[in-house]
Image (tube, rainbow, N blue to C red):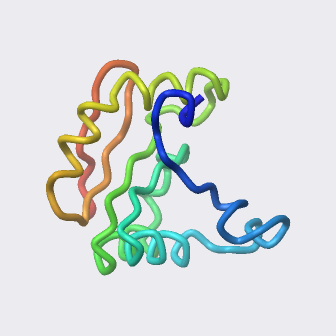
Amino acid sequence: MLRAGGVELTTLAEHYGVPAYEQVNDVTWIAESAQRGWIAFMKDANIRRRPAEREAIKISGARCFCLANANLPAVTMAERYLTNLRAIERACAQPGPFLYAVHASRIARLPLN
């Protein structure tokens, strides 16, 4: 749905290969995505509670967006990103590091400290 909505993306499975992507830790892919200038879309808002992942976002200057609720159907997850695409684009005009929660009709910046 994201691609159909005009989002150019690379999934972890596409980038690292199957099944190798399952072994890549969050710190690694966050840093690599930032190094490549990619925007990170993730479904796990709990990433903000994990010190190593928060530090990876800060050190790498990553620009990250996570769903406020990771227990949604995939269609709803994609809809939330697409609904907020303009706000995401505006946020991405600024340099990282940052982490935003993506809600049904808005995004909200989350603290990294």
On screen, residue 74 above or below 36: above
Residue 102 falls in image quadrant: top left
Residue 84 place in picture, x, y as percent: 33, 28
Q: Residue at x 65, y 61 (%)?
A: 12
Q: Is residue 63 left or right of residue 22?
A: left
* Count of numbered labels shown in the rendering: 0
- Front-most of residues 103 and 8: 8
Q: Residue shown at 44%/56% (left/top)?
A: 40
Quadrant of the image containing the C terminus: bottom left
In the visual, does 72 lie left or right of 56? right
Q: Is residue 2 above or below residue 21?
A: above
Horizontal and vertical percent for residue 47?
Answer: 48, 57
| Outermost residue toward the left in this view | 94
Q: Residue 105 occupies which quadrant of the picture?
A: top left
Q: From this view, report whether residue 108 is shown above or below residue 65.
A: above
User: Residue 90 placed where, x, y %?
Assistant: 18, 41
Viewer-closest of 64 and 2: 2
Quarter of image, res 43: top right
Quarter the N terminus occupies: top right
Q: Is residue 69 left or right of residue 104?
A: right
